[in-house]
Every structure is written in structure tokens, then in C-alpha cells.
């Protein structure tokens, strides 16, 4: 979101409303991408929220001021009640985004969702060619179907947003990816380098690009941007680079419990879709209403403000800018979520980031060495 | 921009303009994004209906804000900026 100023109208001093609601409708998915952001133990997740429960969540969120709504997953298309949820959301006044792999999408559904009031469909790709795309997705026919669905989305009059997750095995395709997007008539292209949470953290060594790969990709994106600007093209390239190559951490989620509220398939409410991995007790929409969850729950208040910060964040003059970085990354890399995000050069654990960079220089494994995200591996990893 | 007075601005497909009580502001919503508009930007975008020309929008706003004097330059500049940001299109 472009506007990050504290909003008036919140119900607690200093806490603005959750403007962004992410509805993770399900963890079920026909693909097996090894960088999936879902939790490793997704296969153990309790029963999904019912249609009526989701409708209640949508109403409560809108009442509080949420304006952007993402339907995500897993693959949200496996929920048979999706058209009903879209219609409810649109009628409430949300801007409704469907974030999908395209698998399970048909031209008829693209049209039906349009009629229900869906504002935007984002289709994700794994590569610019079928061979690599299908190998990464763990599905043999994914690519052709994605192309067909991207075209159907465009034909139905939606804005076209294409998402490519970038890693060491497809980063060399950057130019091909951008020209594919231009040919398809994309309005926005997200070139999102893997963020190392969930399955991507397990597979980090096999996914993280080397610095040389990254620099080459950046040069290509910048050149392409200049070409687009010269042609007055409206296609917008959004290149998300991995924070592992930064010296200061990202202002994760624009601050804990500041703008974003995620509801997981089983109703767990989270300040971001990764936070489930933290040793914090998060509330559930099944037994607490969203307003209480956002403003009053210990989980959502845990890292608000800066009184929780240890050094070096506590006395750092940049703490108001980056909030100490990402709590999940601090936890994954140091075992304590209170610590400064090790991406920061001031962190005493920054050596862990440097070690990951070194590993990326020397990594040789192919994509067949990655752990694919599926129920069998989920049960295996969770037990281990 | 003066040659634009007779052209008709409309929101780019996928963009939605609406009032948000929680933010006490008009906002522009688009795929995975939102801009909170200041009062004057909100007032101009509110008059874009896909039928009115720039000249007609200026006239409406001058009627709404009689103390503001001529608004042609301000409105034209804002719309030109909005076009460059790809929020609106002209037909």
C-alpha cells in the first residue's frame, strides 16, 4: 500500500485500523512449489472455517475499516463457496483480490467471479517456459493452463497482475519473463524473490540467488523499466529483492499489527501469514471477534510500539523506520523473536546472513534437490 | 493540457474510487494497493464519471467552491499528474 500514515478513526490511541485483510481460505493446493509460504505443518491444520464463519469475519473486518481484501491460500479456488464469498465481500465495499495459481480456473469461473464483483485476479507463474515452470510447480500441465487463464483474465476486463517467484533456478530468465508479461498485456508484474519463511526457509540453500545473479537481474529490470518508460507503457514492474543482501532490515508488514491482518484457514488470526511459526498464542476468529483480536489480544499487542526491543534496536535511531525488521526472521535465525532481524549489520547475529550469502556463492544443487511442498513432506518435516 | 479541456477522463480499469469512513478520506483502490487522497484530489476524482469533459468538471468544481477562483490550472495539473501515474485515461 502506498499510504502508510497513521489513520484517524481507530478505536485505540496509536493503533490504526487493519486496512488490509488477507483471507487464507485453505491450505489445500494442487501445486507443490518448494518456496511456499504456508507453514511446514499445514497438513495438520484443523478444520477450515465454514462459509458462514468467513462471512462473519469479512463483515467484522469491513466494519473496522479494512478496504483491501485478498483471497489466498493454498489455492483459494478449491473452496466451492468462493463465488459466494466474493459477492459478499464486494457488496460490503472491499476491493477484492484473488491470488491464484490459475489451476482450477476456467473461463466460465473468470466470468462468474466478474459478475460476483471480483476486482482483480493475480495469476502466479513459476518460470517463463513450460519445462522449468512445471518442474518447480511439481505439475506437468501447469504452464499452458496458466497462459490460457492469464489471457482469459485480460479478456474479461480485469487488470492483469502476474506474479513470478524468483530464485536461483529462474533468475536467469528475467528478460524472458518480462517480455512474456508484456506480450500478455500485463498491467503489473511482481518479480518477487523468495522470502525465506515456511518451505522457502527449509529450501533456502537451494533457492537463494548469488549476488552476481541478483545484480545481473537488477540491471535487466532497470533496463526494461527504461524501455517501458520511453514507450509510455503502463506496465509496472515490481522487483522484490531478497533482504538477505541488505544491510538494514525491511520494515516488515509496516510494523506489527499496524495495517495487516491475516486469517488462516482454521481461523487463527495473525499479524502476517508467517507469524504462525512464532511461539506466541494467537487468537482465533471462531471464539473472539476481530475487533477484540486486533486491538486487545496479547498476540497482536506483543510487538506493537518499541518497549519490547532489546539492544541494538532499543537505542537505535532507525527503530522508528524499520521496527527492528522481521520477527519471524529473527526467530528463524536466532531462536528468539525479540532479537534484531539478523539482516541488520548492527545485529550480533548478522554472521548468519553472511553465511547464507557465502553458501549461495557455492551452491550447486539442481531443482531436484529441493523439498517439495506436499502433504507427505509436511508430515515428515513436522515429525522430524 | 489546455487542449485537453474537451477530453473526457475516466478511471483506469481496475481502479475504484470510494469514501472510507475509517480513514475519513476518499481513497483510490487498485490491485493490492490503496492511495488515501487529500481533500482536493478527492473532490476532483469524485466528479469523474466517464462522461464529463475536463471543462465540465472544472465548471462543477468552481460552482462547488465559489471562493476558490479559477480552478482550471489546478484541476488540469492534477489530472495530468493522475494520468502520468496511470490512475486515469482520457478519451
Image: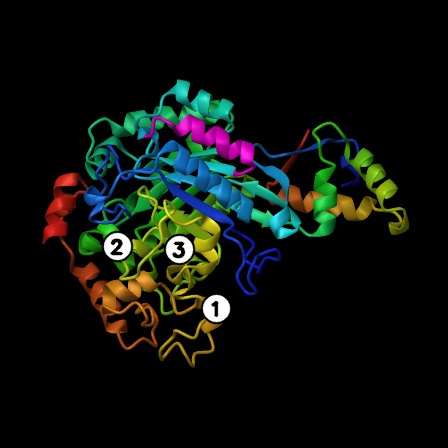
Chain containing the residue with disc 3: A
Q: What element carries label 1?
A: helix
Which of the pair A229/A66 is nearer the observer? A66
Residue A129 is labelled as: none
Q: Which of disc 3 and disc 1 is earlier in sequence?
A: 3
Q: Is mark 2 on a helix, strand or loop?
A: loop
Task: Provide the residue designation for mark 3.
Answer: A271
Region rendered in magenta: A79-94
Which of the pair A252/A62 is nearer the observer? A62
Please identify, in this view, whether the residue under mark 1 or under mark 3 is nearer the observer.
3
Question: Mark 3 and mark 2: span between their CA atoms?
Answer: 28 Å
Chain containing the residue with disc 2: A
- Residue drawn at x 77%, y 36% is B54
Q: Residues within 10 Å of mark 1 (few under 14, many from 20)?
A: few
Residue A221, magenta (yes or no): no
On screen, residue B63 above or below A112: below
Cβ–Cβ under 8 Å for marks 3 and 2: no
On screen, residue A355 above or below A220: below
Question: Relative to residue A375, is residue B90 drawn left or right?
Answer: right
Q: Which of disc 2 and disc 3 is earlier in sequence?
A: 2
Picture coordinates of residue A19, whole percent (x, y): 52, 50
- Residue drawn at x 77%, y 45% is B75
Task: Provide the residue designation for mark 1.
Answer: A321
Q: Residues within 10 Å of mark 3 (few under 14, many from 20)?
A: many
Residue A209 is labelled as: 2
Q: Is mark 3 on a helix, strand or loop?
A: loop
Question: Relative to residue A342, is residue A383 drawn left or right?
Answer: left
Cβ–Cβ under 8 Å for marks 1 and 2: no
Amino acid at each position: 500500500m502506498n499510504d502508510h500514515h497513521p489513520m484517524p478513526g481507530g478505536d485505540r490511541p496509536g493503533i490504526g485500523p487493519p486496512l488490509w485483510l488477507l483471507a487464507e481460505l485453505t491450505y489445500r493446493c494442487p501445486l507443490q512449489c518448494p518456496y511456499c509460504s504456508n507453514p511446514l505443518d499445514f497438513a495438520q491444520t484443523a478444520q477450515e472455517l465454514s462459509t458462514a464463519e468467513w462471512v462473519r469475519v469479512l463483515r467484522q473486518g469491513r466494519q473496522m475499516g479494512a478496504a483491501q481484501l485478498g483471497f489466498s491460500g493454498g489455492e483459494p479456488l478449491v473452496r466451492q463457496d468462493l463465488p459466494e464469498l466474493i459477492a459478499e465481500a464486494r457488496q460490503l465495499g472491499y476491493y477484492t483480490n484473488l491470488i491464484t495459481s490459475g489451476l482450477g480456473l476456467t473461463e466460465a469461473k473468470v466470468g462468474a467471479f466478474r459478475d460476483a464483483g471480483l476486482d482483480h485476479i493475480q495469476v502466479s507463474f513459476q518460470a517463463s517456459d513450460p519445462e522449468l515452470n512445471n518442474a518447480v510447480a511439481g505439475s506437468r500441465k501447469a504452464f499452458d493452463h496458466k497462459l490460457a487463464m492469464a489471457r482469459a483474465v485480460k479478456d474479461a476486463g480485469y487488470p492483469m497482475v502476474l506474479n513470478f517467484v524468483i530464485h536461483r533456478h529462474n533468475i536467469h530468465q528475467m528478460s524472458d519473463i518480462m517480455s512474456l508479461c508484456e506480450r500478455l498485456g500485463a498491467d503489473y508484474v511482481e518479480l518477487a524473490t523468495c522470502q525465506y519463511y515456511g518451505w522457502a526457509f527449509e529450501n533456502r540453500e537451494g533457492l537463494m540467488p548469488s549476488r552476481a545473479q541478483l545484480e545481473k537481474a537488477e540491471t535487466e529490470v532497470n533496463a526494461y523499466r527504461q524501455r517501458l518508460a520511453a514507450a509510455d507503457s503502463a506496465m509496472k514492474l515490481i522487483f522484490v529483492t531478497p533482504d538477505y543482501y541488505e544491510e538494514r532490515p525491511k520494515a516488515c508488514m509496516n510494523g506489527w499489527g499496524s495495517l495487516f491482518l491475516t486469517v488462516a484457514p482454521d481461523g487463527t488470526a495473525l499479524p502476517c501469514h508467517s507469524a504462525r511459526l512464532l511461539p506466541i498464542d494467537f487468537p482465533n476468529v471462531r471464539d473472539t471477534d476481530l475487533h477484540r483480536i486486533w486491538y486487545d489480544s496479547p498476540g497482536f499487542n506483543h510487538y506493537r510500539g518499541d518497549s519490547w526491543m532489546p539492544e541494538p534496536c532499543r537505542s537505535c535511531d532507525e527503530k522508528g523506520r524499520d521496527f527492528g525488521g522481521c520477527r519471524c526472521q529473527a526467530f528463524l535465525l536466532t531462536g528468539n523473536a525479540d532479537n534484531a532481524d539478523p539482516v541488520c549489520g548492527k545485529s550480533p547475529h548478522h554472521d548468519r546472513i553472511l553465511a547464507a550469502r557465502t553458501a549461495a556463492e557455492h551452491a550447486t544443487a539442481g531443482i531436484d534437490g529441493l523439498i517439495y511442498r506436499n502433504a507427505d513432506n509436511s508430515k515428515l518435516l513436522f515429525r522430524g | 493540457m489546455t487542449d485537453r479541456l474537451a477530453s473526457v477522463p475516466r478511471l483506469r480499469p481496475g481502479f475504484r474510487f470510494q469514501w472510507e469512513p475509517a480513514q475519513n478520506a476518499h481513497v483510490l483502490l487498485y490491485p493490492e494497493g490503496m492511495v488515501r487522497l487529500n481533500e482536493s484530489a478527492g473532490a476532483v476524482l469524485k466528479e469523474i464519471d466517464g462522461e464529463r469533459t475536463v471543462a465540465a468538471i472544472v465548471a462543477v468544481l468552481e460552482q462547488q467552491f465559489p471562493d476558490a477562483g479559477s480552478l482550471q490550472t489546478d484541476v488540469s495539473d492534477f489530472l495530468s499528474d493522475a494520468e502520468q501515474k496511470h490512475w486515469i485515461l482520457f478519451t
